[in-house]
Amino acid sequence: MASRRVVYGGGSNGSNMNTVLLQNQRFPCSSSEPLDSLFNSGSSPSFLGSRSMVSFEFVNKGNSRSDRSFFHSFEQEENGDEDLEEYFHQPEKKRRLTADQVQFLERSFEVENKLEPDRKIQLAKDLGLQPRQVAIWFQNRRARWRTKQLEKDYEALQANYDSLKADYDNLLKEEEKLKAEVLQLTDKLLVKEKGTGNLDLSETNKQCKTLPQEPCADSVSEGEVSKVMIMPCKQEDLSSAKSDVFDSESPHYTDGGVNHSPLLEPGDSSYVFEPEQSDLSQDEEDNLSNSWLPPPSYGFPKIEDADYPSPPTNSCYFGFPVEDQAFGFWSY
DNA sequence: TTGTGTTTTATTGCCTCC
DNA sequence: GGAGGCAATAAAACACAA
């Protein structure tokens, strides 16, 4: 453990001086075959030999960072030892990698973001860095990469949420519209019945079949038919009937007061839609499924509470198979 | 020039794996 | 137990507005 906690940074001792010399000797002259392939050898003047140190400055022209690079400093050595001396005797300071070193590391990272020991050594040699510096660079680079991935995940989830929310809003509107329509038809029926004072019994039986929980006209005398017929047509009963449709076609949620939903089964997105259990179209099912995702700041549909399944209590529930798109990035 | 925010390099402590 | 990975963090380097 202690062996990897070595501080290798610049210092006033001679060892660091050796390091810097190594950096200036190795990197511009590198001819490491596997790593050369990472660079477009023709485009980088960095590998043209020792004279390319001048070219380095040329490449990094306008980059203030490179003005303080090892190479720039070393280049000045030709003009005198004073600057070099001053450079080597700087107090321990962080030194940023040159643009070329970073570019080299970036390309290597693109190839493989994990660093095997051999590759680390090779990279270190080619770049004139300490192996630990290479390791640290990769570690920090991976951290940055993960941060970026998180941002992407967040954006994807946000988009998904917005889409579901829009669907949910549309469903609510549609529901209101249908309710109004039912109300209108009910009123018409009432008026009609009051006008005639008579009813077709067969028609009544049809109604009862769709509402099995209500007393059936078969067991009711004809004189009571009108009453029976009208009962389910009250607003709340119609809603109840509507809920029955939901209940019979949707997964069941009641279990001794505990809300259970196949939709909540973590990691089992295949259970979300069960075509053979439903007569609804896929779109309708989609809408129904989506309607189970009340956002935190969102009111759950205010249809009859008793008949409408409660929203999932599982806080991990997102209503869509998140794992399919968002969390497959992590390789660690 | 200076204050401030961001990025990059490096350290520390903890965890996991072999 | 050593090696290596990670998160959290420090601190130097850098960018940029005022």
Image (tube, coloured by chain):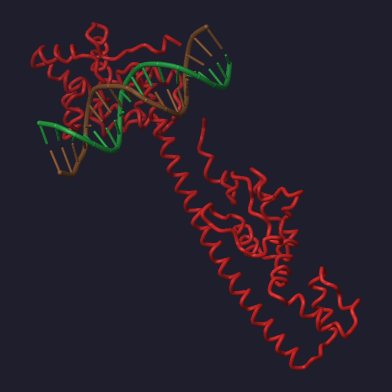
Chain colours: A red, B green, C brown
The residue that appears at 68% across and 57% down in the rendered structure is A309
Q: Is residue A250 left or right of residue A153?
A: right
For residue A329, above or below residue A286: above
Of residues C3 and A223, the one drawn nearer to the viewer in this rendering: A223
Q: Is residue A201 left or right of residue C16?
A: right
Q: Position of residue A39 (x, y in %)?
A: 33, 31
Query: Disc count in the image?
Result: 0
Of residues A254 and A58, the one drawn nearer to the viewer in this rendering: A254
The residue that appears at 39% across and 17% down in the rendered structure is A121
For residue A56, above or below residue A152: above
Q: Position of residue A285 (x, y in %)?
A: 65, 61
Rendering quarter of residue A88: top left
Q: Residue furthest bottom?
A: A196
The residue that appears at 70% across and 89% down in the rendered structure is A191
Of residues A159 and A282, the one drawn nearer to the viewer in this rendering: A159
Q: Position of residue A99 (x, y in %)?
A: 26, 30
Q: Position of residue A181 (x, y in %)?
A: 63, 78
